[in-house]
Image: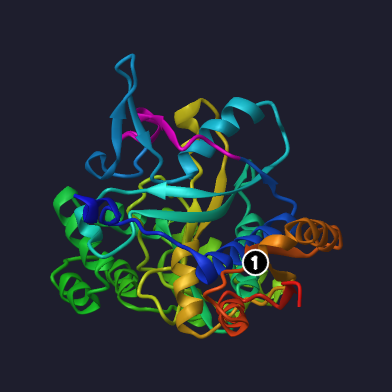
Amino acid sequence: MKDQMLHTPDGVRDIYNGECKQKLLLQDRLHEVLERYGYRDIQTPTFEFFNIFGKEIGTTPSRDLYKFFDKDGETLVLRPDFTPSIARSAVKYFSEDDIPVKLCYMGNTFINSSSYQGRLKETTQCGVELIGDGSVAADAEILAMVVDSLKASGLKEFQISVGHASFFQGLVQSAGFGEEETQELRELLNNKNFFGVEEFIGTLDLEENLKNLFGLLGSFETREEEIAEAKKLAASYPVILSAITDLETLGEYLKLYGIEKYISFELGIISNYQYYTGIIFYGYTFGTGEPVVKGGRYDSLLASFGKDAPSIGFAIVVDQLLAAIQRQKITLASPDYNVLLVFAENKISEAVKKAGELRGQGLNVAMIPMNPAHDKAYYTNYAEQNRFAKVEWMDGE
């Protein structure tokens, strides 16, 4: 029983000492980037009413939610995702605003899924929501923020894959797919089974241009010239054409920010979040098999809460990003103001005074009473292991 009390449940863990410091530094760096783009902080409740994340809004399956009841019998859930919570808040507090609302957040999300074996079920997310701007220019700003955020974390090599929800939707609508065919194709794309995608497309009896457009699903990257060619093929398919035109325009805007080398178009990208309506994107780097950032446009979500407003956002999964920079041997440097003050029992008065003086100078001071069983080398070694820049002695010698 006592051993069990020392362990954490599956999917959660303790973060302490140097790793905790690195995570806090990372969060600070990310937040600084979001502030530089003019985004304002918002905090939403850790738990909400069940319908905020229900099936109608299309976020997380009910079986994957941490659910519980309040004293009135209402079903509550720990948030699995920030976007619906912020959408609710935006409608409640900013519904009269006629200019775009820019909000940023930092906090933990919770997903209880058996498919997440070995993965964290509680993760920290840092992200933004841009509400009330449906332009491609807004899409470009969001991607620029993503790039600047990942660079601020210390990453040198990463890639953002960008797709468009309407491209997939336009294909299945134009082909007249039913639910079964759509789901089969969706699963192939989710699993990056491009051989399976090719086989699936080969069985289709479609108009030639539409079949060629389907062929663009089976590739990790769609080049600029392929986007231009796809635009010609989609001339008779307005939904598909609109998606491709958006991506073509986005490519030009990315050049204005000078970030095009970090962005690739992947038309086979889809999301499990059903609320995405425009671009969808994921960010990857070495050291983790999961995306470190994900986001997209959700122009219809706020209508579920009573306001029709185009919106776009992203979430950086801080824990995944931290794991990646650790595996890439990246250390976030910070000014070292830590002092270890070791004092003898009869020197406590002087030690308290000295610690106060040092803290007044902006230093962080940890006071530790000296144990006669330990020599100075013991405390010096402790200071090195715990990243104290200096040891102050008050031992009467």
In the rendered image, residue 45, in percent from the top left (x then y), is placed at: 50, 34
Q: Is residue 134 magenta?
A: no
Residue extending farthest top: 72
Residue closest to the eye, 303 or 203: 303
Local SS, label 1: helix
Residue depicted at 36% across the width and 59% down the height: 13
Relative to residue 200, is residue 36 depicted above or below? above
Q: Is disc 1 surrounded by few (<14), some (14 to 19) or many (20+) residues within 10 Å? A: many
Q: Quadrant of residue 284?
A: bottom left
The residue wearing badge 1 is 144
Q: Which residues are magenta?
A: 43-56
Q: Nearer the viewer, residue 181 or 24?
A: 24
- What's the residue at 33%, 16% (across, down)? 71
Q: Is residue 171 above or below residue 378?
A: above
Q: Quadrant of residue 218?
A: bottom left
Q: Relative to 221, does residue 339 appear above or below in the rendering?
A: above
Question: Which is nearer the eye, 128 or 142?
Answer: 128
Q: Measured from the top left, where is residue 235 in percent x and y?
A: 44, 63
Q: Residue at x 57, y 29 (%)?
A: 91
* Residue 54 lies in the magenta stretch: yes
Residue 10 x, y percent position in the rendering: 25, 56
Q: Residue 21, how many percent across, how many down?
A: 58, 66
Residue 93 shows up from this direction? yes
